Amino acid sequence: MDDIPDLRFALRYRRTSLIDKTLLKDSSARRKSFSAALQQFEEQMEAARIVTSATRPINLYYGLVQAGLAITAAHTPGNWSFGKHGLKVIDMQCDLPDITVRPDGDGAFQYVDRATESEQLTDPVSFGALWTSLPDLCQFPLEGAASPTALDLISDRHAESMDHTQHGPAYFRGEIAVNGEMPQEADRETWYRTTMANYPGMSNAELWGDSGTTFREPRKGRYLVAVGWPVPQGKPAQDISEQEVEAFFDKLAPQYRFEQERYLRPRVGPHQAPPPSSLMTWWLLLYTFSMISRYQPRKWAEILDLDKSPNAAVVQHALEIALPVLPHLVLEALDKEQVLFGRPLRL
């Protein structure tokens, strides 16, 4: 986490640099609220660094709400302020992965959701499904969460034909990285069809090769699956530019936080809707955490008990991860464009 840039300067700079580029130029009320909200976001994030996991969700969530107010002040035409959360947690007595959060009216969540052009959340969704869909947390399994998980996608830079020439119908090529035990060869096609049904954009993807060569295991507990997406209109590979390949993968699985790191995110919710953006998924998770920690402090203490709770370590780690992730996602939402870093060393 120490290798990830501190974005406080960038966020402070936006308090003047965004004025002429956004709706802030039209209203002193917007500008004053924008500045005050970003100041509160920064101070809540600083407070979250100091306190332990017992209190951290409250600082993180309310800091994020203030950042949301700055986002809507800058980018939402008409009424941009809000007075309620817009969410409701259903039955906090459940095990953590089974706790459900749903939309509730039109509040902060909905305002920021629209301002950032995220996928709309219309139905209740489980905490476990949100957790596993998030690229930042997909490597840290939450016990009891059986939902599909975000998957690394390694994209090729060039299109390719099935016959490995430049003249046949082209495919966009990539490999999907999966953590777990590789399926037996006889089960691989069934596994592929069943699993990929959970991921938007995978309906026309094909296994690249036969079941014996498509799957490979670079190391124990992780395997790669080679796939291809047919290029529309059967264009030959020689006619597909690197820019076209990049544009295809940017739509299917945009780079996330780090250069050339892409993720397939699974559908969530009872109607298998596409997931909210990563920013809004974090919002839902932190709202749920803050509600438990505020109104069910004994349950929250039990969740954090490293000696008794199987999820204590990953929950505490998630709250650590949020410290660098939230400023990054807020900066992108304010700029309305990606800010990508080089990946620090991962062990």
Image (cartoon, rainbow, N blue to C red):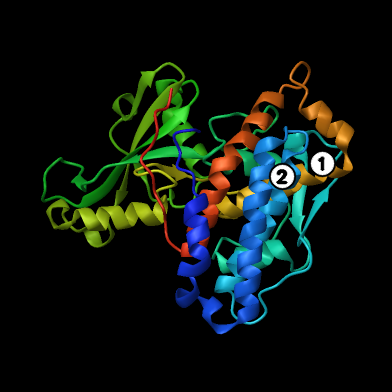
Q: Quadrant of the C terminus?
A: top left
Q: Are marks 2 and 1 in contact (CB under 8 Å)?
A: no
Q: In the displayed structure, does residue 259 sit left or right of residue 3?
A: left
Q: Is residue 271 visible?
A: no
Kindly report which numbered mark, 2 or 1, lies closer to the viewer in this rendering: 1
Residue pointed to by mark 1: 292
Q: Position of residue 120 (x, y in %)?
A: 62, 62
Q: Secondary structure at mark 2?
A: strand
Q: Is residue 304 visible?
A: yes
Graded by Cα atoms within 10 Å as few (under 14), some (14 to 19) or many (20 or more), the crowding at tag 1 reads many
What residue do we see at 61% from left, 34% from top?
A: 320
Q: Position of residue 125 (x, y in %)?
A: 70, 49
- The tag on residue 224 is none
What residue do we see at 65% from left, 62% from top?
A: 37
**First-in-chain label (2 vs 1):** 2
Q: Quadrant of residue 218?
A: top left
Above or below, 210 against 283 in this view is above
Q: In the displayed structure, does residue 134 sit left or right of residue 107?
A: left
Residue pointed to by mark 2: 126
Q: Secondary structure at mark 1?
A: helix
Q: Position of residue 43 (x, y in %)?
A: 66, 50
Q: Amino acid at mark 2?
A: Ser
* Foreground pick, 140 / 301: 301
Q: Position of residue 291 (x, y in %)?
A: 81, 46
What residue do we see at 67% from left, 24% from top?
A: 313
* Foreground pick, 208 / 41: 41
Q: Amino acid at mark 1?
A: Ile
Question: How far is the residue under mark 2 from the one under mark 1?
Answer: 14 Å
* Foreground pick, 84 / 20: 20
Above or below, 129 against 85 in this view is above
Graded by Cα atoms within 10 Å as few (under 14), some (14 to 19) or many (20 or more), the crowding at tag 2 reads many
* Foreground pick, 1 / 343: 1
